[in-house]
Structures are given as structure tokens and as C-alpha cells.
Amino acid sequence: MGDENGSAEATGGRPRRLAGARRLPLRTVLIIVVVVPSITFAPLLASGMFQLSSSWRAEKAQMDLATTIVGAPAADLFFSLDRERRLTAEVQATSSGAARDKLAKQRAETDRSVNAFRPLATLDPSGAQEGLTDAIARTARGLGLLDQQRQAVDAGWASEQKAFDYYSGVIESDLAVFGALAQVDHIEVSTKAQTLVDLFWAVDMIGREDAVLARGWKKGYLTRDEYGLVADAIGTRKHLLRSRVIPSLTGNESRYRTLPTSKAWETLTALEGRLVASGVGAESDRVALREVGPAWRASVETATEQLVELLGVRLENVSRIGYGHANVLFILFISISTVGLLALGLVIFTSWRLTSILRRRILHLRQEALELQERLPDVVARLGRGEEVDVDAEVHMVEPTPDELGELGQALNLASRSAVRTAVRQADQHRGFQRMLQRIARRTQILIGLQLKKLDELERKHEDPEVLEGLFDLDHLTARLRRYEENLVILGGGQPQRRWRKPVRLLDVLRAAQGEVQDYRRISIEVEGEPWVAERGVGPLVHVLAELMENATSFSKPMTPVEVRAAPVSRGIAVEIEDRGLGMEPEQYAAANALMQSPPQLDVMTHADDVRFGLYVVARLSAGLGLQVELRPSAFGGTRVIVLLPEQLVVERPRAVPAPAALPEEAAPAPTGPQPLPQDDPAGHRPPYEDTQLPTRSRGRAMASVTAPAAGPSERDEAPASSDRRPLPQRVRQANLVAELRVPADRDELADQETWAVRDRPSRSSATIGAFQRQSRRRRTDDASQPRPSGSPEPGSPTTED
């Protein structure tokens, strides 16, 4: 049909996403702004916290190992082995009962120390100092031979030197444990702990010296090897004390700087000096010892006690410094962790807060833009209804702020005001153009009305069939032109001016619409029953049906028929118009039906290049009249349009409807000449509209021009001459027109309503006009063959005025 190739313009309520580079949503961008600094700051904070925590745990673990876990059992083992070494040497030298009792007691004490030390062999080496586990393992292996060594000493199998070497070796392994414990991460603690190791070595040197001399006091002499062991021990101890221990004493340890000058140390030093001097220059393998046992024992015990006391002071100082530094690391860890977490939380909260404020402001601007988008169509619609619009009242001003978003809001205010002002100006221009279009169409309709009036005068004046045929064709074209001008009025926002005062039969309405179609011969009409249409729906319904019929004939093959069927249904009357064209695509049907449901406000300026206005006109008229129009695919491959007239437009047949005037007797027979039909009917049935009158003169005249061809010369020659002069047939205006479609005699009473555009003139059926033409020709032939009496009228002139 006429708009089968067109599609309804789809409008969306929200702006679609523009094509181009893919952008991240605003929420994602703001989340990235929050997350990136947090992710960047969090690893740094976590790294610092981890390092502090690791340092604190490492130093605390090292101090625990050095003081309690490993240090205390190792120190007890050291002193126990040192005393057992001396007592073992005394037992091997004298074998007295008192010495054996002391040795037994010491062995029991040593066993307790060994039992406390053995579990250290399973110590977890992950947090221990480097070399600690190896030193503990060596010491544990040495202690494994302790029982065997004791049995050998008791049985006399082990020599004095072998027993001395065994105990000295285990003690050296134990001193290696102290050396490993001194290797801590804190430099100051490690330095001070090294002094502790030196003090243990000094005590060991005194113990070695005492163990070797314990054998010599009983024998009265020392062998050259034993003398060498004693001399080495004396020299090592003096070096450790003078060079490494005494210079490192600070604080409360300073009082031990005078340790070498004490009475016990002086006695010890004097005895050692005489021992060394006695061995110097001696050529024998033995070095004689003087009996100085009690003085030696007293000085050794006193010197050893003083060194152990210094060990305790230094250990306390090292523990205080080590644990103090570990506590500082812990406090620093807690402080930095707390401050860091607070800072991280502050960064996250501040960033989130700022981004939330920023996003809220941006969304507010976006909402203002969306409201403007929704407000503009409403403003345009109100302007289209002719309402006055205040630009300042329609624009919601965004409060400006002294930043970039404030400038954006100010720009949005200017854009909103400009858009509303532009819409108002365009609406004014559109209304002006519509008014101009309506004025032009109205003036053209006046000219068309005058043209129809002139054609009516010419049709009444001329009786030549050829002239009448041309006049009827012009009348038909003028009626179609009138419909096109009404289209312009509808496109301009107006309504057609053709109005009826009384109901009209639906059949007459369909034929009136058929009469306004160019290729009306292809249209067949079939109406079930005799429904009538209310007067207010006649004009728009004729226009709608004419547009649909025109589309059906235009978009189907020239020889194919267009079927129009009408029948009552439950909700009114259904009129079906079915062609046999190419049809449309499913989406085109959907678009056309959507247009029928809600016709948009057509902008004639923007659609100036689109000539497919038929469906739009139908949609506008149907919406105003309450018609339901639906397009469907036809079984013949074309399109079927269903027009549903609501019950409000269907009325009962008027009570008093005058019957059509009787035709003259001569007009009763049907024309004998060839009669072109609107479509070829193989059954030979006549179309249902052939013998009825049309509600418009254009249809009647067009059909008359088809059904009543002019007679040729042979027809005039064969016409029998009649001796009696029969009068010419008289034309009576509106004689064959239903009363509802008759125009009042006084046309001035409808001048205010522009009824000049309503061509509800009387028209005749094809049979009546054909009979009229034949009788006219016959009468003129008779007049030509007989003389006219004086005063008689000219042939072909009407006897009465129509």
C-alpha cells in the first residue's frame, strides 16, 4: 500500500551510547581513584610493618635463646663440667675417698645440667642464630660419651691427659654455643655479648690451669706438656682480661676494672709467676712445684667468683639492652601499624568521600541534563497544543560553584535556556508554517470549490456526451485534488472541513471513497447488511478509506483487483481492504501498526523530502475519530487493512428516508452497448455498486463517463424515427440522491462553515445518465428532420432550470 515501504520512526526516551572508543563508567573511574592510592600505600605500609614485626620477633627470639632457652642451660653445663674436670683430675692424682665423694656429688649435679641441655638438640633452627644448632649438636654428641668417660676414669682405664682432653673438648663445644648466641642482629647487643664469651673463656682458662695443677700438687712436679698447658692458659687468660674484657667494661661494670689489682688476683698472679719462672731454663722433663695448695685454692676460687659475678652483671646489661631494643621495635611496630592503618583508613575514607561528592555532583548534573531531555519534548508538546511557555520557569538553574563542575553547571544552565528558547522559537516557526500551510490549503480549497462549481455549471450547460465525459473526468480529478488539499490541511495540524448533518449509509461512504481513487474500476465493494455511519464520522471516514484504497491500487499490479468488504462485528463494523501487491516486511508492518496506535506530531519541515504521508494522514484521522486500523499480510501476498468502526460511529437507519426518485420510463432498460466493468468477473455477476447512486458527484460522473459511451453515427442512423414528438428528458437536481447527502438550496447558509468544499451534489447512476444521453440524441435527430415551430426552443436546450 502507499506507505508499505515506510517505517515508523522509533524514538527513545534516553540517549543511546555513542559509538567510538570504549570508555570506563564514572563509578569505575572513581573506584580506581580510591583503590589505586590505597593499593599503592597498603603494600608500603604492610612491608614496613612486616619488617618491624620480623625484626622485633627475631631480636626477642634471639634474646630469649641467649638468656633463658639456651644460655642458662649452657651456662649451668659449663660450670658443672668445669668443676667435674678439676675433681676428676684430683681423683686420678690421689684416689682418696673424700675426693671421690666430691666427684660423685658433682657428677649428679652435672647430670642435671646435661638433662636440661639435651632437649636443645631438637631446637627449631628457623629463628636461631647462625651456627647455634651445629654447636648444640656437637656439644650433645660430646655429652653422649660422658658416661663412658666416667666409667673409664673409675676403672682407671683413662689416663689423666685423656680425661682432661675430653672435658676440655666438651667445654669448648659449649663455649661455641655461647659464641653463636652472641651473634644477634643488634650490633650493640652483639658487641657486649662477645665480652660475655671472652669472660667464659677466661673462666675456662682458670679451670684448665686449676685442673692441670691439681695433678701436679699431688705429685710435686709437672711434666713439660702439662707445664705448657698451664703456661698457655695463663697467657690466654691475661690476654683476654687485659685486652678485651677490661676495656669494654662500662657503666656499673666499671668497678671491675680494678679486678686484676685485688688481693686474690695478686696472689694468683704471684703464684703463676713463680710457676712460670720455675720452668724457665729447666732442662729436665719435669718442673718442680712448691707446696702452695691452700693459697692457690683460695685465690682461684675468689678469682673465679669475681669473674662469674662480672658475667652476671654483663649478662644482665646485655639482656636489658637486647630486650629494650626489642621493646622499642615492638612499640615502633605498634605505633607505625596504628598510624599507618589510620592513615590508610583516612586515605580510603577521604578518597571515597571526595569521589562520592564528586560523583553525586556529576550525577546531579547528569540528572539535570536528563530532566532537560524529558522536559523539552513536553515543552514542545505544549507548544504544539498552543500553550504559552515561560522560558525562565521551564529552566531549572543549577547552583553555580567556584570550580570546574560549577562552570559545567553554568554551561548546562546556558544550554538549557538556549534549548528551551530554541524549542519555543522553533515551535513558533512550526506553528507559523502550519498556519501558512493551512491558509494556502484553504485558499486552494476555495479555488477547488469554485472549480467544482464551474464544472457543475458546465455539466448543466453542455449535453454533448464527449464534452460531458471530459467534464466528468475533470470533476473526478478535482475531487481527488480536494482530498490532496485536505491532506495538506491535516499535515498542517488542521481538520478536514467536509461535514454532514445526517447519517449516511456505509455503502455510500465506501462508494464516495472509491470515487476519489484514480483507478476506481479495480475496486469491488461488498457490504453485509445496511449499516449507517454517524454524521460526524462520514467526512473523515471517506478520507481514510480513500487513502487506503488509493494505496491498495497504487502498490499492486494494474490488472489485479482490490477487494473491499464490510460487515458488522461485536465491537462495531469491520471494513477490510485487501490488495494483491508485494506486501511489506514484518518490521514494516510493526512500524506501521505502531504509527496507527500513536501517531507522532509530524514536523513537515523535517519530512519535506518524504512523500509517504498516506499512513500518517490515516493515523491522524483515525486517532481523532476513534478508528482502529491494523495492517496484516494478505493471503494473496499483498496487504490487508482492517478498519474497525467503533459502536459510537454506527447508528440505526433513520426512520424517514425518502426513496430514490423513479427513473423515466425510457431510462429503465440498461444500456445495450459494451459496459466496461471495474474488474473481470468470470461468473458474469454485476458489481454490487453498479445500479446505486454515489454520495459524491465525482463518482457518479466518472462512472457515467465509463458506462455511457457516446453513440456513433451508425447508432444515430439505426434509431427509428418517431412521428410523435416526445419531450426531452428533464434533469431534476438531486433527484437520485439520498436525502442525507443533499445540499440545501440556499448555499449561503453554509458559507461560514466552508461547505463549498463539500461536494455533496446529486449524481446519477450509469443507467440514468446513459438513458438520458440516448434520449437526448434521439430527440435531437427528430428535431433535425422536422421543422421547428416558431417560438420553439433550440434542440438540446433544457425546458426547465435545474
Image (cartoon, rainbow, N blue to C red):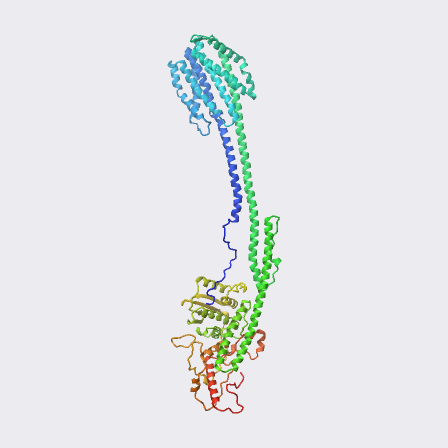
Q: How many marks?
A: 0
Name above or below for residue 154 compared with residue 536. Answer: above
Residue 789 percent across, percent down from the top left: 51, 92
In the rendered image, the residue lying farthest to the front is 713
Q: Residue at x 42, y 17 (%)?
A: 167
Front-most of residues 322 and 468: 468
Left or right of 393, for residue 243 = left
Residue 225 percent across, percent down from the top left: 43, 12
Q: Residue at x 51, y 49 (%)?
A: 25
Front-most of residues 321 and 17: 17
Name above or below for residue 565 compared with residue 45. Answer: below
Residue 523, visible in the rendered structure: no
Quadrant of residue 718 within the rendered picture: bottom left
Residue 269, visible in the rendered structure: yes
Residue 646 percent across, percent down from the top left: 49, 69
Q: Residue at x 52, y 45 (%)?
A: 31
Residue 168 percent across, percent down from the top left: 43, 17
